[in-house]
Image (spheres, helix red, strand yellow):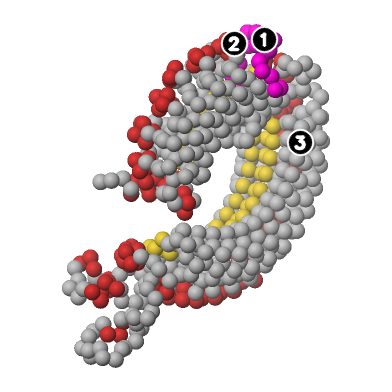
């Protein structure tokens, strides 16, 4: 393993293992290597490495440095009892190749080299017979070595965002594979050996150049999720219809002219076929889809819906945006679970009033979408949408560039109870005072994309408010009186001028989501945030945070914490990229003890 040197005492038991004086020292801190020998895990992500130091590959072969300095080992220093390396993370570096020495780590179960500049994978990868998860995504791979197909225990293989144009024929030998992501490559064909991947649960082929899918794909008896978005598919093999485990199927942005029938797909919950060229939806397409919750058909060429749409009794979302539908079947009102019906961009002439159930067509505005989306805008000759007021309970006057909301809009409400107000995309300098007239019923208010510089006290009496969207205004503060909004769950304050997280928000215990990106926030109070036990999402992207308080790590209720685009140095980008749980764990480790 080493080289003897002249003049060394023959009785020195370590003589064969000393490093020559001329050999370069390790580029990886010895402390990390020492810890990895004990834990079996080594994380070298985000260290600007252009090559992997030799002592990393040889971590389980070489006698460690500390053995040279100290011959009286305590229990903690018994290097001969070291743990074999099982997890190696080299993500977000500048690696252009991996050494064949990777074969020296046969115990590896996880190897993560995503976000580098790799153009190939060494054939020695085939020696890692215990490997279960391999992430080589976001590199420059042009091909995959045949040896990779020998990894019989591999469960997760992530190859997305590379330059792959073909796959080895032996791919089907990866019999344990459960997750395979090949999205964003240049694949024109899929090997027929895919039929042998009978353990596969998730397969992502999106953003490639596939013209067809092999019929053999139907042999994947465990497949639950298949994503073929943005390819060049003109047909789908009829065999696909026999995939009994399939739950989610994405065929968006292809060249399909008709939908396949799915007689065996009894578990299919989501079918996404938007942005194709589908002209007809028939009863045959629908009658077997008993479990379907989401049917997305936007941007096709449908002229009508069959009455048999009512067979989809579990349907929750039906997106028919931008088709050629001029009338709807009356029976559409008989779908008990339907929450979202999107019909914008269709030449609808008549819609029967008895079809419009409030539960069906309530305006669904998602707080993270770029612009307000109305689930359904009914045709109306006047500028006041009476249908929306009476049936949908929506008061809408948006995208009018108006400096004030005309009285006739409020007058039209009459005795109707309004749940949703949308005054977005105008030129409002203040919140309309007459909004207080809606306080007994309104729960969703959108005032985004206006010119508001302050929030009037009128809005603080809307005690049933659950959603408030005031993004893209000129706000610098919120009134303390807002703590009266005792049901507020979601507030969107993105693209304003806040310098701190407004103090009043800490006193609204019902808040679940605070969106505060693209402001000038320089400080947050982690102790107050920790008391907000319902808060699950906190978006602070693109602000002026110079540091992230470590105590924020104790806010374990946060499921989504977004901090990118701030000037702080730590946590580093590589930690942020791992997601909220990793960021919170890192912050906790920095809390002074």
Q: CA distance from mark 2 to mark 1?
A: 8 Å
Residue 299 at x, y percent in the picture = 75, 40
Does 526 sit left or right of 159 as displayed? Answer: left
Kindly identify the residue that appears in the image at 46 percent across and 49 percent down: 576
Residue that badge 2 annotates? 434
Q: Residues within 10 Å of mark 2 (few under 14, many from 20)?
A: some
Residue 335 seen in render: no
Between 206 and 405, the one lying in front of the other is 405
Q: Is residue 209 above or below residue 303?
A: below
Q: CA distance from mark 3 to mark 2?
A: 35 Å
**Helix, strand or loop under label 1:** helix
Does 329 sit left or right of 530 as displayed? Answer: right
Kindly identify the residue that appears in the image at 52 percent across and 36 percent down: 517
Residue 372 at x, y percent in the picture = 64, 30
Decide: marks 2, 1 in contact (CB < 8 A)? yes
Q: Residues within 10 Å of mark 3 (few under 14, many from 20)?
A: many
Decide: marks 3, 1 in contact (CB < 8 A)? no
Snapshot quadrant of residue 591: top left
Does 104 sit left or right of 236 as displayed? Answer: left
Kindly report which numbered mark, 3 or 1, lies closer to the viewer in this rendering: 1
Q: Name the N-terminal-most of marks 2 and 1.
A: 1
Q: Magenta span has 411?
A: yes
Tell me the tag on residue 407.
Answer: 1
Residue that badge 3 annotates? 322
Bounds of the magenta segment: 400-422
Q: Magenta span has 587?
A: no
Residue 397 at x, y percent in the picture = 68, 20
């Amino acid at each position: 393993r080493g080289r003897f040197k002249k003049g060394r005492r023959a009785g020195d038991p370590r003589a064969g293992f000393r490093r020559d004086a001329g050999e370069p020292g390790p580029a990886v801190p010895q402390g990390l290597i020492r810890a990895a020998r004990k834990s079996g895990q080594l994380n070298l992500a985000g260290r600007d490495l252009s090559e992997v130091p030799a002592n990393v590959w040889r971590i389980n072969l070489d006698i460690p440095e500390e053995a040279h300095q100290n011959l009286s080992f305590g229990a903690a220093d018994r290097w001969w009892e070291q743990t074999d390396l099982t997890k190696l993370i080299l993500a977000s570096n500048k690696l252009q190749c991996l050494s064949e020495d990777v074969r020296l780590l046969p115990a590896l179960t996880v190897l993560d080299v995503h976000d580098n500049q790799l153009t190939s994978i060494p054939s020695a990868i085939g020696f890692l017979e215990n490997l279960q998860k391999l992430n080589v995504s976001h590199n420059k791979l042009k091909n995959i070595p045949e040896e990779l197909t020998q990894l019989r225990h591999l469960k997760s293989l992530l190859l997305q965002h590379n330059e792959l144009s073909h796959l080895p024929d032996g791919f089907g030998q990866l019999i344990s594979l459960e997750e395979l992501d090949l999205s964003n490559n240049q694949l024109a064909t899929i090997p027929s050996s895919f039929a042998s991947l009978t353990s596969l649960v998730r397969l992502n082929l999106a953003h490639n150049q596939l013209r067809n899918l092999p019929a053999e794909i139907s042999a994947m008896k465990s497949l639950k999720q298949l994503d073929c978005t943005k390819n060049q598919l003109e047909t789908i093999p009829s065999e696909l219809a026999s995939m009994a485990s399939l739950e989610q199927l994405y065929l968006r942005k292809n060249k399909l002219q008709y939908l396949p029938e799915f007689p065996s797909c009894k578990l299919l919950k989501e079918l996404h076929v938007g942005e194709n060229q589908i002209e007809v939806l028939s009863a045959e397409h629908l009658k077997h889809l008993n479990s379907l919750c989401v049917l997305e058909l936007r941007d096709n060429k449908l002229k009508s819906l069959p009455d048999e749409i009512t067979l989809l009794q579990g349907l929750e979302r039906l997106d028919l945006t931008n088709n050629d539908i001029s009338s709807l079947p009356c029976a559409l009102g008989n779908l008990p679970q339907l929450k979202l019906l999107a019909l914008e961009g269709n030449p609808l002439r008549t819609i029967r009033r008895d079809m419009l159930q409030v539960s069906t067509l309530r305006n669904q505005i998602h707080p993270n979408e770029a612009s307000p989306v109305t689930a359904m805008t009914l045709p109306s000759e006047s500028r006041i949408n009476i249908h929306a007021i009476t049936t949908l309970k929506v008061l809408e006057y948006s995208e009018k560039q108006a400096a004030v909301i005309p009285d006739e809009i409020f007058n039209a409400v009459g005795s109707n109870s309004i749940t949703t107000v949308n005054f977005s995309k105008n030129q409002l300098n203040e919140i309309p005072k007459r909004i207080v007239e809606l306080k007994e019923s309104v729960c969703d208010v959108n005032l985004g994309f206006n010119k508001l510089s302050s929030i009037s006290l009128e809005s603080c009496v809307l005690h049933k408010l659950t959603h408030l969207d005031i993004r893209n205004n000129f706000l610098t503060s919120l009134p303390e009186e807002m703590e009266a909004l005792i049901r507020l769950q979601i507030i969107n304050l993105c693209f304003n001028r806040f310098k701190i997280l407004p103090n009043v928000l800490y006193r609204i215990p019902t808040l679940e989501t605070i969106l505060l990106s693209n402001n000038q926030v320089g400080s947050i109070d982690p102790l107050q945030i920790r008391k907000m036990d319902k808060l699950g999402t906190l978006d602070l992207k693109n602000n002026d945070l110079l540091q992230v308080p470590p105590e924020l790590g104790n806010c374990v209720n946060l499921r989504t914490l977004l901090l990118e685009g701030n000037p702080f140095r730590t946590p580093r980008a590589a930690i942020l990229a791992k997601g909220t749980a990793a960021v919170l764990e890192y912050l906790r480790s920095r809390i002074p003890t």
